[in-house]
Amino acid sequence: MIKLIATDVDGTLVPEGTADINTEIFEVIARLHEKGIQIAVSSGRHWSSVEWLFRPVASKLFYVTDNGAYVGIRGRTLFVNNTRRAYTDELIRLVRGDEELAIVASDENGYAIEKKDETLISLLTEGYHTKCRVVDDLTKQNDFMKTSVYCPTESSWKRAEKIRTAMQGKLKIERSGEKWLDTNAFGMNKGVGIRLLQNSLSIRPEETMVFGDQGNDIEMLRSAWYSFAVKNAVPRAKEAARFEADEVSRNGVLKILKMLV
């Protein structure tokens, strides 16, 4: 019997960086919740973005966000794992010298950036629906749960890969979609967040179903027996999953969940 379902958002449930969600999912979540099944939204997004996107059913969800560094429910934080300050500051300084790359740092209140890039700000506030503040110096802010390198072009990715190499072994680093290189505390990932819920709720991996599409979903996919990669997933995610769901544009996750209902 399935007792816990967790799904990624971008590239799995909605097209990346959008709020284009099939509203039928809200009724399905409500009906699964009535059956006693726990639902978690597990995303690289900030918790406030998840709460906004799922606002009709937000009270029925666990949030496993910032790649597992934040676990909570509506109005209550259950777990936070911040990144070691020295490594975050090193990453920020490496990115500062690049005209295209930008750091987006996430704390419990929202996102912080140094560059007043209107395109980036619009993506964060209108695409992800998360508060964003522009600061003079990220190294003088509070600790961060996640720091992401924004890579808007293919050429910028080549330089971002050099930064990944420089920070290897200091931070957990994974590509998250087309424009993001996510970094968390070493050892932190979505699988950690899901296992925290499993242990707290006495739910086994054999009673867990998860959905994902990217490298930052791999540990989560390995935390459940019923692991699904959507058809548009990257090869590494497909290798980590036991099953395949239809692609995001064809509502693959929703199709599987409707079968459970």
Image (cartoon, grey):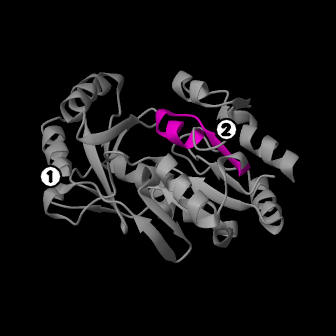
Q: Which residue lies at the image location 27% right of the left edge and 54% below the top edge?
A: 83
The reply to whether the magenta stretch includes residue 184 is no
Residue identified by numbered label 1: 86
Q: Nearer the viewer, residue 66 or 14?
A: 66
Q: Is residue 1 above or below residue 37?
A: above
Residue identified by numbered label 2: 227
- Where does residue 259 sit, x and y in percent of width and height? 87, 45
User: Crowding near pointer 2: few (<14 within 10 Å), some, many (20+)?
Assistant: many
- Where does residue 164 sit, x and y in percent of width and height? 26, 31
- Where does residue 180 sit, x and y in percent of width and height? 39, 38
* Residue type at the position of mark 2: Ser
32 on left or right of 158? right
- Quadrant of the image for the C terminus? bottom right
Q: Which of the 4 image quadrants contains residue 70?
A: bottom left
* Residue type at the position of mark 1: Ala
**Earlier along the polypeptide chain: callout 1 or callout 2?**
1
Q: Which of 196 and 94 is in front in this view?
A: 196
